[in-house]
Amino acid sequence: MDFSQLVPWICASLNCTTPDQLDPWTLNELYTYAEEKLRSASRRWLLILKYDATTALAAGQGFYDLPDDHVGSIFAAVNGVVIRATTVAQLEAFDDDWLDAANGTPLRWTENALGLIMIRLYPPPAAAGALALVYQAASQDLNTASPVATAPAIMGDYLSLRVLEQARLRQGDAQMLDASKAFGSMAGVLEQAFSAYYGEGE
Amino acid sequence: MTLSDIRTRALTRIEEDPDDPAWQFAATAAINEGLRIFVYLTLCLENEREFALTPGTQFYNMLPAWPDWILPLRVRISNSTAASYQARFNQQPGNLAQFNNQGAAPIPITATPKLRPQNLYEMASLDPNFLNNAGIPTRYGSIGCDLFYVNSNPGQAGIKLQVTYARMCLPLVQDTDVPEILEPDHPSLVSYAIARLRANEGGLELSNAAPLLAEYLACVKARKAIVQTRGIEQGYNIPVWELKVKGKP
């Protein structure tokens, strides 16, 4: 999805022929709205899913950094064998001494052991190996320098409607608030489809 | 109806000059937006292409390969024994027709070509070791907007899937272009374009155009119901859901 291709249409919807004529908005402001809505969409729905098998396991090490764009893990496997999602409370119920468990073959993973950016394997691996993850990812930056996002074409229309909603909201007079609501409700129709096709995210 | 017809009808009804280039641009953009939303909500357009699996890989992101991808409807092992390129016509966004260039070496014909849909945890419950399995896949799944996976890792090159998927429409560019949706649904694009152009103005113009938007959404709902029923009869793995529209449809 290339957001720059939609900019002329957004400008026309704001009664401007070119981005230079935008008033009181700026082109960067429109991109800011779009980026915020794309980030929000990638959190609300399971929109951007990635498979990553690049994490190398080290013997005796329980904690591993999650990818930078990680929002939530869906599935994990060690050396190709699926391991179970577990909470810390469940681990404690299962093994009171889980923090000092002897090295072995990892059977479970937990993501709430230490903040949101690390995954912990239980028990820690006894040997080197590979961790594979399927995870919900955050969207990348969207700005004039990088207007392309990995998303279906319809996401461009969704973002356009949300950008217009925000742009008209800023104007504040009653007529434009009506316009803002109209764009928002059109985007809401697409949101129902996102929930049905991709499922709810975080 | 052609793009020119739809545009002229919409602009005439909002008292604008159909020959004014600025209004032509706005109306064309509104019609294309309405068309994309229609196609996305109804899943009324499909494509069938062959997809060559890569040995050692079970997960694929589809959008980089097929930008018109929405979601999979049916997946089978392709029993085509033709080596090299498949001369199967495919359409891509941008009005560019192209041949499927993912052909590969032939594989033996399988008697059970249909792949059943499963989520990751269903695959894991059948076989926790499925990520290490080599062989012709029997199950597939899809998660997110384009992450596609199969339950076994094709150990040999040349295994191809025949993927039927819901696809996005081609954009309307030339005046003579015709929307890919069914002819009876074309008037809904006129309604959407009027409502969308009026939405830019707000106020009375917007509220007067609201019934047209409702008309468009009613047409979407009706077409979606037909596509959904047809999809179930086809044995598609189609998501069944209800479009809820506020106010009168």
Image (cartoon, rainbow, N blue to C red):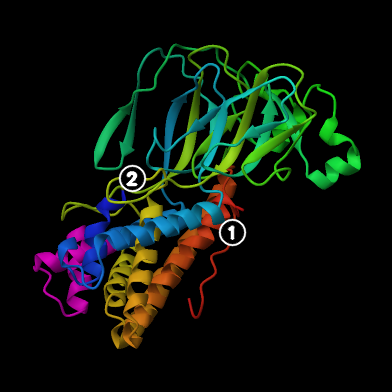
User: Which residue is at a point 37% across and 40% down the rendered structure image?
Assistant: B67
Depth check: B101 or A170 in front?
Answer: A170
Q: Position of residue A144 (x, y in %)?
A: 27, 51
Examine the rendering and report whether any part of residue B104 can be seen.
yes
- From the image, state whether disc 2 or disc 1 is nearer to you: 2
Residue B73 located left or right of residue A177 = right
Say if labels 2 and 1 share a chain: no
Q: Which residues are magenta?
A: B3-30
Examine the rendering and report whether any part of residue B6 can be seen.
no
Secondary structure type for disc 1: loop
Circle number at residue B241: 1
Residue B123 lies in quadrant: top right
Residue with the mark numbered 2: A148
User: Which residue is at a point 67% across and 46% down the rendered structure image?
Assistant: A115
Residue B40 located left or right of residue B176 = right
- Mark 2: amino acid: Val
Q: Position of residue A48 (x, y in %)?
A: 50, 44
Which chain hosts label 2? A
Q: Is residue A129 magenta?
A: no
- Mark 1: amino acid: Trp
